[in-house]
Image (cartoon, rainbow, N blue to C red):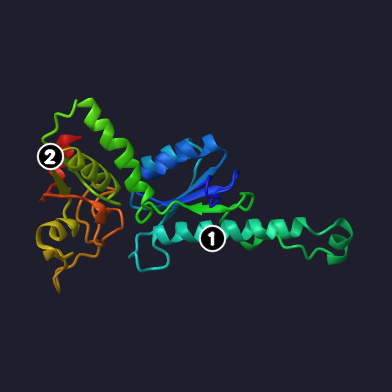
Amino acid sequence: ALESGELSPGGVVTEGSAGSTAISLATVAPAFGCKCHVVIPDDAAIEKSQILEALGATVERVRPVSITHRDHYVNIAKRRALEANELAAKDKKVGQVDGKDRDQMDGCVPDPEKENPGFLSHYNGGFFADQFENLANFRAHYEGTGPEIWEQTDGNVDAFVAAAGTGGTVAGVSTFLQEKSPKIKCFLIDPPGSGLFNKVTRGVMYTKEEAEGRRLKNPFDTITEGIGINRLTKNFMMAKLDGAFQGTDKEAVEMS
């Protein structure tokens, strides 16, 4: 993003995340002179917010709503980046006004912080990382995690199993491993309520919990966070999978 100019030094990286991506961004962004603003569902573990804040990120907790709602945490994160860019543009425009003109404006110079009290204005623009649809997610695991697994196992890999939220991990790793050896089997493990298991095994994003009269207020009837989804992402569509399993909360707790 810095190389392409989409993110400027001193800018803020925004992301909507209930998983590990936010923690990674909050760790890396300061190394490049940038800040991190994370929007997270308020039903996510409070410890995640505490870790993010300890890393220097600003955290905005919002109520869970459908991805089609403008106030879904991902959509808010995207909006925060746009707001940061608008505020930076206003600051630049105001900064181009000389002292005489500023006096003539008689206090009419806009105050971005007052106009957007919920979002800091001193960032040099914003960049929405877009972990669900940005294929840099897939490439990070295709170029990093996959080769790491291959090297550390000396190529002795029979199968790979992973859950999916954005789909970047399972897609990047499965693609890399199957390019190394078509004999390697790659599988998805999906939590209760997610539609990915059905998509992989039956070709449709549908779960019995979503049948008329059976849908829960919160369709993800699971304690796991950051995995499971009922829509296809660009990253997940890159996955090379041989099948899928459904996992239970009990199994997740035992593994942890």
Position of residue 188 measured from the top left corner of the image (x, y, whole percent): 16, 48
35 or 138, nearer to the observer: 138
Query: Which one is nearer the viewer's eye here, 142 or 44?
Result: 142
Callout 1 touching callout 2 (CB < 8 Å): no
Q: Amino acid at mark 2?
A: Ile
The answer for how far apart the CA atoms under marks 1 and 2 are is: 43 Å
Percent of width and height locating residue 11:
58, 47
Q: Nearer the viewer, mark 1 or mark 2?
A: 2
Q: Is residue 45 visible?
A: no
Which mark, residue 82? Answer: 1
Residue at 20% in and 51% down: 222
Give above or below for 125 relative to 25: below
Of residues 62 and 123, which is closer to you in this image? Answer: 123
What's under tag 1, amino acid-wise?
Leu
**In what element is the residue under mark 1?**
helix
- Residue 159 found in image quarter: top left
Q: Is residue 130 left or right of residue 12?
A: left
Q: Which residue is mark 2?
A: 184
Residue that appears at 24% across and 65% down: 217
- Residue extending farthest to the right is 100
What residue appears at the point 10 percent right and 35 percent down from the top-left corner? 158
In x, y percent, where is residue 94?
A: 75, 59
Q: Position of residue 69 (x, y in %)?
A: 38, 68
Residue at disc 2, secondary structure: loop
Residue 7 visible, this orientation: yes
Residue beneath the point at 24% across and 49% down:
164
